[in-house]
Amino acid sequence: MVISDRVNLAAGAVNQNIFAGNYIEFVPDDCILQFGFTSDEAAATADNIKLDVLCGTEQIARQYVPRASGAQPVFPDDFHLSCPAPAGERIVGSVRNAAAGAKNLFWVLMLDLV
């Protein structure tokens, strides 16, 4: 299964969980998760968007900086994070925008059932 979306963040904004309310916030079945993230930042300022990704209590990424591309993540180039996840595990993706202007974060989550 593949799920994707875009999150817009105002200057200085934080989204505590980009997966909240989505079908995959709580993993439906035992699976391997693969995360792809990109942003619409200029390459020169590509460290303004930072992500923390957790699967249950396991920290997958801390202050991860996605590639600046302005488009949806491409497999396998933009899929740098993965983890196993048992059924019912909660996925949390917290994102911060430290830029002076609004930015977009594009994400794709692939669930491979095991």
Image (cartoon, rainbow, N blue to C red):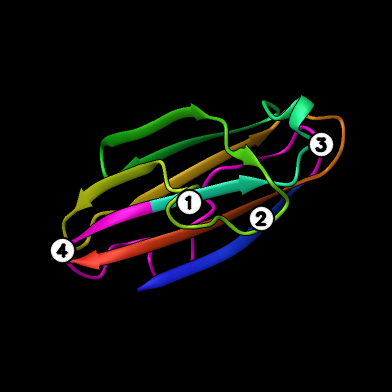
Residue type for callout 3? Ala
Left or right of residue 59: residue 104: right
Element type where label 4 sits in the image = loop
Residue type for callout 1? Gly
The residues tagged by marks 3 and 2 sit, at their Cα atoms, a distance apart of: 13 Å
The residues tagged by marks 4 and 3 sit, at their Cα atoms, a distance apart of: 37 Å
On the image, numbered disc 2 is attached to which residue? 7
Q: Earlier in the sequence, mark 3 or mark 1?
A: 3
Element type where label 3 sits in the image = loop
On the image, numbered disc 3 is attached to which residue? 11
Would residue 23 be counted in the magenta stretch?
yes
Which residue corresponds to the image point at 30% horizontal and 55% vertical from the top-left? 33
Q: Is residue 1 above or below residue 48?
A: below
Residue 3 location (% of width, % of height): 46, 69
Element type where label 1 sits in the image = strand
Residue range (magenta): 10-34
**Which residue is farthest right?**
101
Which residue corresponds to the image point at 49% horizontal and 66% vertical from the top-left? 21
On the image, numbered disc 4 is attached to which residue? 30
Quarter location, residue 10: top right
On the image, numbered disc 1 is attached to which residue? 36
Closer to us: mark 1 or mark 2? 1
Category of crowding for the residue at label 4, using alpha-carbon neighbours closer than 10 angstroms: few (below 14), some (14–19), many (at least 20): some
